[in-house]
Amino acid sequence: MKHTELAIRSLVERLREKAMRKSTPNRMAGDMYEAAEVIEQLLDRVNRWNPVTPETMPPEGKCVIACVDGQNKSGNIKYEGAYLFAEWYAKSGWWFDDCPELDGADVKWWMDICDVPEEKGGTAG
């Protein structure tokens, strides 16, 4: 677990502890406990690597980040633990957007790409 994640989880625990104090008004305690739950759920979604198994494959055709070992078809470029944009297709396997010539790649982990944040006016970037 990263230091930042440990710090956030510690703050979530402190928030829950304060919510449980008798001196905390009931309405505020409920809001504090709910906020702790939301923060914890968001933390669990951020930076989550998924193992490559039949049960955990990304949706077909969705672009994800994949941790890849392999080499190109001519064998002169090797990838070891490289992070590449990739898409999974049930019939043909992995497609690597930046390296379509990648041959026999071994993907052990994948992660969703974060959504683009929206600005206050409702438009991105």
Image: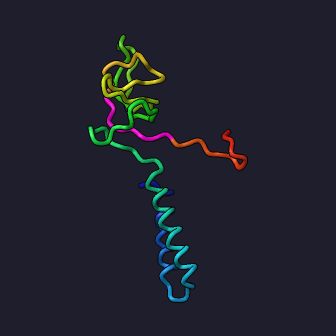
Look at the image and tell me in which quarter the C terminus lies. Answer: top right
Q: Is residue 80 above or below residue 42?
A: above
Observer-nearest of 117 and 104:
117
Q: Does the stretch in magenta take in 110?
A: yes
Residue extent of the magenta highlight? 106-113
Horizontal side of 36 relative to 72 (left or right) equals: right
Quadrant of the rendered image containing residue 84: top left
Q: Is residue 66 above or below residue 39?
A: above
What secondary structure prevails in the magenta region? strand
At x 30%, y 24%, the residue is 91
* Image-based side of 64 in relation to 91, left or right: right
Q: x and y percent of residue 53 in the render?
A: 27, 39
Q: Give the residue at the far top of this rendering.
A: 74
- Considering only vertical position in the picture, is 39 above or below 49? below
Say which quadrant the N terminus sits in: bottom left
Q: How many marks?
A: 0
Q: Residue at x 55, y 42 (%)?
A: 115
Residue 27: percent from left, percent from top? 56, 80
Quarter assignment of residue 112:
top left
- Residue beneath the point at 46% across and 64% down: 9
For this rendering, which residue is in front, 86 or 4? 86
Q: Residue furthest right?
A: 121
Residue shown at 46%/47% (left/top)?
A: 47
Q: Nearer the viewer, residue 79 or 40?
A: 40
Query: Residue 95 at x, y = what percent?
Result: 40, 24
Q: Residue furthest bottom?
A: 22
